[in-house]
Image (tube, grey):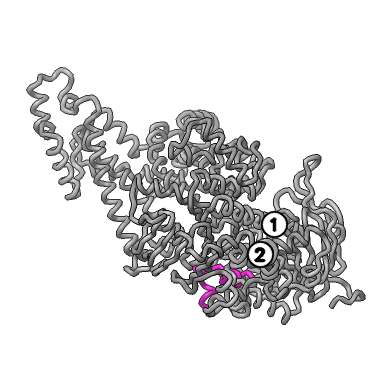
Amino acid sequence: MGRYLLHRLWQSALTLVLASVVVFVGVRALPGDPAQAMAGEEADPATVEAIRAQLGLDRSLPEQYLRFAGQLLSGDLGTSVRTGTPVSDMIGATLPVTLQLAVYAMVIAILLGMSAGVLAAVFRGRWPEWAANGLSLVTLSVPTFWLGILAVLYLSVRLGWFPASGYVSPFEHPLRGLYYLTLPALILGLSHTAVVQRQTRASMVETLTADFVRTARAKGLGRAAVVFRYGLRNSLIVVTTIVGLQLGGLIAGAVVTERIFSLPGIGKLTLDSVFTRDYPVIQAVVLVVTTAYIVINLLVDLLYTVIDPRMRVSGRAR
Amino acid sequence: MTSSDKQPLLEIDDLEVSFGSGAAAVAAVRGVSFRLMPGERVAVVGESGSGKSTTAHAVLGLLPGTGRVTGGRILLRGEDITHADEKRLRRLRGREVGLVPQDPMANLNPVARVGRQVAETLMAHGVASRREAAARTVELLAEAGLPEPRRRARQYPHEFSGGMRQRVLIAIGLACRPELLIADEPTSALDVTVQQQILDHLDRLTRELGTALLLVTHDLGLAADRADQVIVMSQGRVVEAGPARTVLTDPRHEYTRKLVAAAPSLATARTREAVTVTAPAGRATATAGEGEPARPVLEVDRIAKEYRVRGRGGVLRAVDDVSFTVAEGRTLAIVGESGSGKTTTARMVLGLVPVTSGSIRLGGEDVSGLRGARRRAARRSMQPVFQDPYASLDPMFTVERLISEPLRIFRVGDRASRRARVAELLDHVALPASVAHRYPNELSGGQRQRVAIARALALGPRLVVCDEAVSALDVLVQDQILRLLDTLQRDLGLSYLFISHDLAVVRSIAHDVVVMRHGRVVEQGPVERVLSTPAEPYTRQLLDAIPGSGVLG
């Protein structure tokens, strides 16, 4: 186990280094110049040059990268070109919002998706399966932003069930905070529910036709015991993988959702920084999200060993 | 036990089971009747598709998919359970009728502890509370012959060997002391020596407990060994029934006669006949050749294969110092149980796995170290036929494309000549030319294996490596394929390296045999000598484990 963990950590570190290079180059490939943006359209070339030198943008790319990497290693994410505040402060203020939204959305997606998936598998070929499949098709095909706008129009504006926008920290006001986050999380979660549902259904169908399930029934076990004790536990393996992969997409999806509901999350920060070519902020945000993604997948892989005893004998191929 | 005044435990009366519905319904069981007295042991024998397993599952109300009883009755102790509701069936399953299923690898829940899987049977029927069940589980596992049951109960199925898992399944089947135990091919996935231990144990347990046994098997020899009564099924009907010995020694129905003749496990009798009737034609050439020794096609000299065991720095010798020679026009068989190294040996010969040491010479040329173009050339004269005809043919290719593929790879001939060659090859393996445009899933298992053989022959190889090539086939089909291989050998002068776990099959096809165990050669020599007067106790043990060997002996 220790060896396996070490191996995975080393892999993760390597992935992070690669990600930092890609981000660094990618940001600089964007059209536009931060120095020009800061100085304004009318500024004379000498001023722009001075700003560029001050930001270190006049050096060669490898040199810039090394400086950037050196800062990172010492825990310094840099300073925003636009606002002059440390990037770490900006991320510290926005990341919790996005994480709350993403986790809440995932919980909704798992609860709805797994229940619908189990129903569809158990009532195969009957109406609950058609209903679940139809619903998943709709939530998959309808874009989040459109669904979000509809939800705001009807559920918030017309019916007044939910606030249309705004954010209250659930750490300060737990109930109110959750209440404010519910509609955005539901909208964001719905688009991922379909995937969870389909995967649950597929792996439940496979498990329920497995030989060991027939043997379980031959023991005299009831249907519910077979579905939950045998079917669901075996299907969790597949669902866990999907959830891990989805969390990355969820953070990306949060950018759109945050915009619709005006949540002060990392998505909003990213958009603002891209518009002003705020290199340090964009770089830092992407790196933080990448790190989150890697950590989540590492946790998912460790979770396998809890769910599936066959994985506990680590690193030894059978 | 067969006194007619007692009430039968299980009575099946004109049973009909169909799959599908309406006009598309297909009857899998048609008018089957038999009865089983308390404590009696009855075997239902038949090939795949004969309806034997379907009959057994109908008793438990566990028909797969769209299957349902469409006629007749099933009586348990006089109670009609043909259309019993789920509640009644749940009480019946496990409590009154136990099941030991076929494949021990697939029949335990991989994510639950073994002990729990035994205990839940007890708890489902209220036989024991949670606390009692745990203690009782350990007793049951011990009773089923599992060493260290207390520790084993806390482990997961993947930590068990196949034989151990089957013992767990037996413990589950007998947990609630049912009056009837249905054993559906309980050992066909296991090695012969393990198979024998398990069946002996099952025998003893059911006798001690007075449990009646309904044994479902494809193996006539095994049925004769283990049952009082044998019921032979074919295409959903009972074709013959009677006391085990009578059915085997004096079969009335033509189908049973064919089955007895084809069963390799009963080959003791057959070889004795064969030596005087059919064999001389084939074997004479081989024996006559012994004056001037036949030219060796394949010479394997002291090969070994080592695998590094990950994480522990150890080395596993999967194959250790193995040597043998396959002469022209002869068949050498390698027999062994799982883990004996026989398949790894075959893979090294085929060049699919590199050797760690030793040499492999094909037609005098060392092929073990060859790379690239020269290895490809060596492959031309050496072709494989694998075990599973369902998995080894690409389902997206037509038969013609499958057979002509090696010709295309080696750029032999043009389109027209390749087509002619495919027709010729189909003729060799006794398939009609019309098969060329079909896809593998339109063919039966036996036909697919013929296609695989035709493909192997396409390039005119000198050596064909058959890796368990007949193991997945029903006995009658198996017999046909073995005859085909024999004919091809005589007509084309082929040499075979035949890998098998089945001594009975080896006895009927090979000239020479190598017995392997734990990666080493235990014994080798001509089949007649090794299998009639084995020098090693292990060979003796393997021979004794063949079911049915005692019945006709």
Q: Residue furthest top?
A: A42
Give the residue displayed 92% in from the left and 75% down from the top.
Answer: B5
Element on which disc 2 rests: helix
Q: Nearer the viewer, residue B381 or B173?
A: B381
Examine the residues drawn in magenta and state their main secondary structure.
helix
Q: Determine the secondary structure under disc 1.
A: helix
How much space separates mark 1 and mark 2, taking CA atoms?
10 Å
Can you say whether A133 is above or below B476 in the image? above
* Horizontal side of residue A250 vs B508, given as left or right: left
Q: Chain of mark 1?
A: B
- Contact, CB < 8 Å: mark 1 with mark 2? no
Up-down: is A78 above or below B244? above
Highlighted range, magenta? B148-169
Q: Residue at x 43, y 64 (%)?
A: A312
Q: Nearer the viewer, residue A104 or B120?
A: B120
Residue on which disc 2 sits: B264
Residue B384 magenta-highlighted: no
**What residue is shown with label 1?**
B476
B391 or B406, which lies in front?
B406
